[in-house]
């Protein structure tokens, strides 16, 4: 078995603070520890399909540790197994172009491909591994923290920090104006950010996708606060939070563009209803993209650096098809297949939920 | 002419970082310099109409300097000249209850009333002064910076800081994803925050209410960047920015709830159109309430402290009907009437606009 | 066995962001889950000895979650087993006054005492438990992260965040001025903050108490950077870092006030020597107390809340003599005795050190 | 009179957030408005003497607006009129090498030289202008804010923000531990940062170079707080603060390396004496270099951008020997000679001091 001489690396999917820290750690570990060359693939799978690639020297990664974004660029649409290209009539057609991935790998004599991304990016990586035997190592990335194979993903702590600091800011306004404020944070399928920012920011109500809510229960919580002389409330809602039961009878798809709730976001829906039900002035705000950009926290920089280092280690040990991840204090490997099978969601009976409930937080039930 | 012995103070209108710093400076200056008692009126004009008032001792303002919000509470609806109360049929009716203000002033033997607020709050204060001879001193407050009588209002620097740091965060995502990002900031009638955050964050396009924009001009700017190899653009838009000319023919009212632009905010409107026109993926985000809450910047704490001190000085000198304000390096007084007559807007030919244009920023024209 | 009805809580030792979050969680969990009353003991063991105590209601802990410090006050000198009091001649004398602790516990009918503190505070708690059978539950607290019984202590993430952001700031100056900058962070016996801030801030050299350093090795690292065209270097040093071997022959005690290194801090020592050895202009800065004050990060608020909740749970289960702690994703109990026996230090062969070395960081050896 | 075609720009002196923003504004204004080429001189006057220079294109300044430091490098020792070079014996000798500056200017056909720096850098620029007729435009830069010719310099707001946020952090520790905390900030000859951070952070005592202090007066202030039940105090001291009167009889030179006060900083001196005098535990911290590095605030980015734009305007109008500066809301020109003649210091009877005193701050007299 020959030694690894050239590593390719790509970043795929949505933005996530810490991507540059992973790239830096991969380049530096490869160069300084093993004399391995690293090639950066530009714009995620788009570059892998279209042979957009450049060598990364140590000086190329100087100063990028504290920077948001990714110096390699990314794309979150391009899939080599279902790639959109205009056909002879100029119409878009989806084709399997995975042979072009093989060409890029071979032309650049890459011995391994490190894919830094979420479930989409890593599922594709795994399929490349399984169907074409392409040697891949996965690195988990998502601000939503909804990936298995790791206790936590880099980017999450930064998103949580931004969200919590936003709850802090809005707290003072809610209190001064005697208002209910609904703060919508990211988390389409998993409520980690909402749960964390709700606990960290002292939210009175936290709504997450894993626990369907009832508006009356939220109202009860607010009434109870009113009775105690508290004239304001903070509701932290994950974008994927959903009402439950009688009130909304139709089966709701979170991604349906005509979904009446989606139009203004779940925060608008909850805000308007709760204002009607309580008579208390209510405002909502959708934090949006500020949660996923900017300089990573120290925690995320360190975790991303560890992931990058261990990805190179795994590459040298030819642990293809595996994903690095944090387990307790250690970095461990998990088969990518296992990691991307189902999202990592908040268990309604987990210790964080129990803790939040013990200190008085309501989850809409 | 007798000496001032008791000062009343209220905070009115929207939240604004620095309100507590004003209150603290008023209480401390009054107590330590002059032995004057200060009474805090709760919830703005609501408290003045309904005699909700409490004495403020030095210990009541301990530790509030760095805190957002206002310990006095606020309201932005209650107007003593047009106060909503249920009539005998239980229906809301608007009445002039300004005599109840006089009662509160007299019952509490207040020698002067300091009103900390925006144009609405201070216009009412001025009317109380003119029609009922109530001795008022105004303190200007608005994160939008659109008040005359001062070069700058406290709260603006904090809002600008939050907005600029958000542009920074979104910058990295735009660059990594090759996207156009539209960031909507506060500013319904004046574009100060958008102008500042656009200049501070390196926005490629800035849209402000004072300069109606044309979508084609924005497109031209983006095309020019594309030609230079720049695959992303940042558009910073004030919520009150408006399109001009042929494309939108109807006279548009910013507050019309059915206005197609208002529904998703101007950022959605611009984002969608520009995505169609350029074919570049575009996202928008509305920063919302995070701009007006939270701990004030050092600049705002100092300015608010100066306003509070000078409001007490003005009170002692019985400069009723005047508003304190920053003029260059000094604090000066202006008749409230003059200050609230028209909003302070960005002059399209001012030095800031010229500077922004010189470094390549487009204003949609 | 009777039910717990009254909990006493004290905070001891140095300041640490998250103390208020623990207090809040204890009060809210006790009141809302169990109807237990909570009594706050003022100024650590001083209050316990002198019966300074007050009931804490839910409203007493409102708004304290994001605040640094401790509403209970603290002291880091008072030890009931060795308490300094003036004797009849007015001279200070150290006595065992632990009977007064028993009196305070009995007079206030406290069923359990929660001690939030570092090894000092909790060692005393354990001795109270062992010698007087006082029912104690320990909560680990130290920004240095050097306590056993938990994977991490609250306060550490905040300290790390401040330290890393300081390294970021100093990075730009080092680079612009072509300087070596030495940044001294907290950590007398353990190098966790230095290691984290060095990894997070991209330090070229990290010096920690666990790994005695040699100045020539630091010089070699800097020479290597110079060769690569890098004209600046960042050295992150724990205050307890120590030189090794021939150069310094005497046995060095970190706390010796006459220690030549301590006088200006280890950073001055390293800075001066390295400037002499390399001829490159060198500056040093000691971050000091800014690392241990101020608003806790989201991570620390959540961890502190979990500790507070579980301390009450442990109290209800009468797990006296135990300390709550984070183990992987879970909160577990450890005998206090075990937790305070030896400090938790960085193992020189741990994965963090390996990772840091792999990306090129030098540890002075 | 021929048109300006090539601009040279250098940055000199200590680090200051906003330098990159000036460079960016100069390059973009020159290129986009006037088609002028810009050449960056590396490492301040060192590069000007030694012809270290490179062309700056628009892409060279992309992304630098939010970054601390200067992409051109700087030096704060090299003076063309007194330049240290080894003579034939290998000994350092100081010579006038200003002819080499002329050579660099001529060889690179620079029509104007923009010097961004403090009083040292700009005084040299002025001498080059006066003795050699070199066409210079000055841009004022100092975090200390002690330059004339402008109401405020960029970098100051960032330094003030860092210092104030540090006072905030230390506040919670002081309060929890019932301590006196002395925070030493930058400001050797002028107390602007100490005054601002003291006012913004709620310092009880502010010590600045412009107002010699008496320890007894500080003690009185602390005693007064103790009487009011306040068990902690915050003292914010400029590094150049000096005691007055009987206690210290010798004429003290701030830069004397043997000055007993300088050794540990004025904060140590004050801290130790005040602890002795009051018996209250006292700690001090020297903020140091964190005040002058890192990303500039929005305010500083905007001001720096304005300075850069107006420096190019002044260059085009051939206003050589002038310095740009902020005057109220406008940018105005001042002869460099006038600006650097004396430092801009805090007037002891200015409105800021009056305000601080009115709210109860003590200045050590």
Image (cartoon, coloured by chain):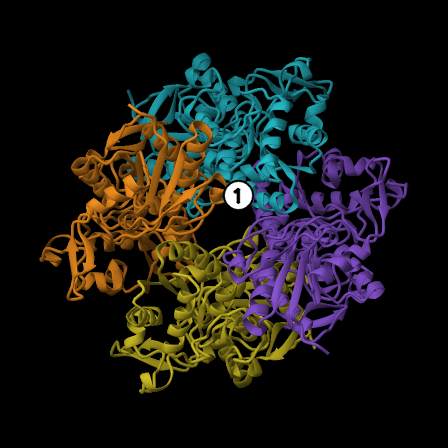
Chain colours: A purple, B cyan, C yellow, D orange
**SS for dot 1:** helix
D197 relative to D275, above or below: above
Q: Is residue C299 visible?
A: no
Residue D153 in percent (x, y) is at 33, 39
Q: Report which quarter residue A281 is drawn in.
A: top right
The N terminus of chain C is located in which quarter?
bottom right
In the rendered view, does C232 fall on the left or right side of C38? left
In front here: B145 or C128?
Answer: B145
Q: How many marks?
A: 1
Residue C344 in percent (x, y) is at 53, 78
Chain holding disc 1:
B
B92 relative to A349, above or below: above
The C terminus of chain C is located in which quarter?
bottom left
Q: Report which quarter residue D263 is drawn in.
A: bottom left
In the rendered view, does B342 fall on the left or right side of B170? left
In front here: D289 or D84?
Answer: D84
In front here: A365 or B235?
Answer: B235
Q: Residue at x 66, y 65 (%)?
A: A7
Residue A79 in percent (x, y) is at 79, 51
Q: Is residue B33 visible?
A: yes
Residue A8 in percent (x, y) is at 67, 62
Q: Residue at x 70, y 53 (%)?
A: A51
In the rendered view, does A94 fall on the left or right side of A113? right
Q: Residues within 10 Å of mark 1 (few under 14, many from 20)?
A: many
In the rendered view, does B105 fall on the left or right side of A359? left
**Label 1 belongs to which residue?**
B165
């Amino acid at each position: 078995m020959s030694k690894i001489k050239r590593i390719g690396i790509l970043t795929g999917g949505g933005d996530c603070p810490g991507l540059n820290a992973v790239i830096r750690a991969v380049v530096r570990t490869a160069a300084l520890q093993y004399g391995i060359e690293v090639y950066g693939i530009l714009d995620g799978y788009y570059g892998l399909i279209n042979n957009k690639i450049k060598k990364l020297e140590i000086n190329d990664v100087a100063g990028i540790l504290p920077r948001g974004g990714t110096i390699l660029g990314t794309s979150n649409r391009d899939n080599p197994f279902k790639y959109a290209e205009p056909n002879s009539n100029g119409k878009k057609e989806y084709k399997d172009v995975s042979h072009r991935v093989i060409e890029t790998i071979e032309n650049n004599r890459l011995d391994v491909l490190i894919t830094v991304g979420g479930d989409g990016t890593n599922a594709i990586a795994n399929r490349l591994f399984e169907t074409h035997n392409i040697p891949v190592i996965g690195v988990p990335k998502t601000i939503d923290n909804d990936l298995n194979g790791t206790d936590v993903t880099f980017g999450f702590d930064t998103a949580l920090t931004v969200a919590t600091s936003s709850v802090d800011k809005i707290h003072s306004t809610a209190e001064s104006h005697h208002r209910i404020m609904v703060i919508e944070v990211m988390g389409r399928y998993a409520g980690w950010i909402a749960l964390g920012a709700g606990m960290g920011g002292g939210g009175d109500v936290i709504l997450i996708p894993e626990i369907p809510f009832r508006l009356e229960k939220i109202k009860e919580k607010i009434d109870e606060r009113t009775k105690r002389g508290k004239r304001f409330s903070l509701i932290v809602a994950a974008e994927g939070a959903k009402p439950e039961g009688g009130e909304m009878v139709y089966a709701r798809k979170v991604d349906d563009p005509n979904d009446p709730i989606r139009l203004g976001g779940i925060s608008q829906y909850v805000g308007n209803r709760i204002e009607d039900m309580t008579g208390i002035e209510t405002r909502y705000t959708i934090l949006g993209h500020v949660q996923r950009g900017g300089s990573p926290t120290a925690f995320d920089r360190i975790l991303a650096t560890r992931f990058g280092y261990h990805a190179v280690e795994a590459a040298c040990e030819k642990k293809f098809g595996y994903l690095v991840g944090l387990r307790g204090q250690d970095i461990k490997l998990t088969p990518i297949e296992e990691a991307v099978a189902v999202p990592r969601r908040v268990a309604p009976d987990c210790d964080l939920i129990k803790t939040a409930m013990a200190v008085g937080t309501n989850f809409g039930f």
